[in-house]
Image: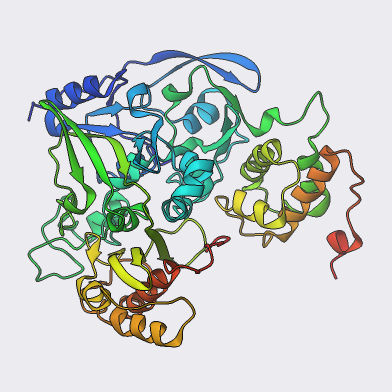
Amino acid sequence: MSPREAPDRRKTLGEFRVNGERREVAYEPHRTLLEVLREDLDLTGTKHGCELGECGACTVLVDGVPVLSCLTLAQEVEGCAIETIEGMADKGELHPLQDFFAELGASQCGYCSSGFMLASKALLAQNPSPSRDEIRVALSGNLCRCTGYVKIYEAVELAAKKLRGEPCEPSRECTHGR
Amino acid sequence: MLRLPKFSYHRPASGAEAVRIVAAHGGEARYVAGGTDLYPNMKRRVQRPGHVVALSRCQDLRGMRGEARSGVTIGAMTTLSAIEHDPRLRAEYPGFVHAASVVSTPLLRNMGTIGGNLLLDTRCNYYDQSHEWRESIDFCKKCDGSTCWVAPSSPRCWAVQSSDTVPLLCAIDASVTLLGADGERRVPLRALYRDDGIDFVQKRHEELLTALHLPATNGWRASYRKLRRRGSFDFPVLGVGACLSMDGDRVAELDVRIGGAGSWPIPAQKTVEMLRGAVLRFDDAASDELIRAAAQEAYKPTRAMDNTDLDAHWRKKMAPVFVARAIRDCLPGAPPRRDVLG
């Protein structure tokens, strides 16, 4: 075994494409995407939960694929298209997922919401008409301790309808309960 | 924030270059594929490599080739999601795809690779904890300490084999290619694992797992049954892989491996011996009774200890139940598995 060499502690200069903008950041090479987003780019909409891959709070999209930013090394995604919750609204207009999460109470304390909405967005991009079971599977990597999930599934179903251009009025049961 | 310790990061362009870097740094270097196992372990300070060698740029570790008639080779850097959604694998290796699709969560399957899953670190309630937690019990045998807290008088470590794909891939007799400093060798998975929580893989440190080879599909059927608390996230606390080929109504070949209940995929030898040559039909009371009696023999070799989620005695009692279910899944006429989160 070779004697332990001092690890490289110099900062590296990297360019990230976050929410369509090019951002240059000097960061330590062992930092995760979550740390760079929150601490170097001030994009604190991405939440840190367990930081071990057990909760989904830090979900972001990398080239459209939902991944956990707490276990992704920032270096690995330089040059990739990164989307965070801050990039979800378009010119001041909320994304239908954001609209329905708010309207239905699918977001309560809100800590898990950005992860849920990004995982949902990736699902709807691939499958515009998911069944309830397909939504459950796609969101099974995100934990929510407030809602009991039903409101979240309903919000995703309504957002899918809106994105398909179909009528999407929430039922009275959705907003007032049984 | 739980932060990674500092390390030097290498991004070689080929498997051979990666092997050279790890060989040069010895035990100080680790490979990283998806990072879903190594990085949490580094954050908990149970692994502290000074050099991390990323395989993400190694194009030679990606892709699939071959066909079901002669066997399929899958590059080690193929993600579990890619396996789960590959139409050809779904049609030709449904048992394997099912095992890959019940690993953790969709987000982690987007990141985790098949190579990483095959070499997943063994797990234990006394090991998968923060540095402070482990320090408070004076650490454990697997990392920094000298006592195995699961069995304090035991000379060995009892950390648990926790990969979902390993029991099934051992049952179907898949193999892997290991690339070392002096060339490649092909190793059957059944010979890769050891019954030891610390030294659980029989490969040299610098050897790199480059590809998984699935055997030709010539009539065998395989199934994986997983026990866990939740339908998502959780590692198996019992995971049974079975592979069966029939000659008419008779069992021609059978292999059953029990995961999540010992440090390696435990072969259910007696169960297999009892059923070899037996007449088995799906949905037939006599066959079910035969399978139940044979599966009961899996109770003894199952080494469930009190170091995972759920009660160890119950997990041990569930082993024969899951072995019987996995074997029944493989009978001609059994419906395909359609679990949603289960």
Q: Is residue A139 visible?
A: no
Q: Looking at the image, which is closer to me, B201 or A121?
A: B201
Residue found at x 82% / y 27%:
A92
Give the image location of residue B191, x and y in percent: 16, 51
In the rendered image, which quarter is residue B168 located in? bottom left
Give the image location of residue A116, x and y in percent: 64, 46
Q: Looking at the image, which is closer to me, A177 or B181?
A: B181
Give the image location of residue B258, x and y in percent: 29, 66
Residue found at x 27% / y 29%:
B52
In the rendered image, which quarter is residue B267 located in? bottom left
Q: Is residue B75 left or right of residue B187?
A: right
Q: Is residue A53 left or right of residue B17?
A: right
Give the image location of residue A61, x and y in percent: 59, 32
Q: In the figure, B149 relative to B205: above or below?
A: below
Residue found at x 7% / y 30%:
A1
Residue found at x 23% / y 19%:
B17
Q: Is residue A145 left or right of residue B267?
A: right
Q: In the figure, A73 relative to B37: above or below?
A: above
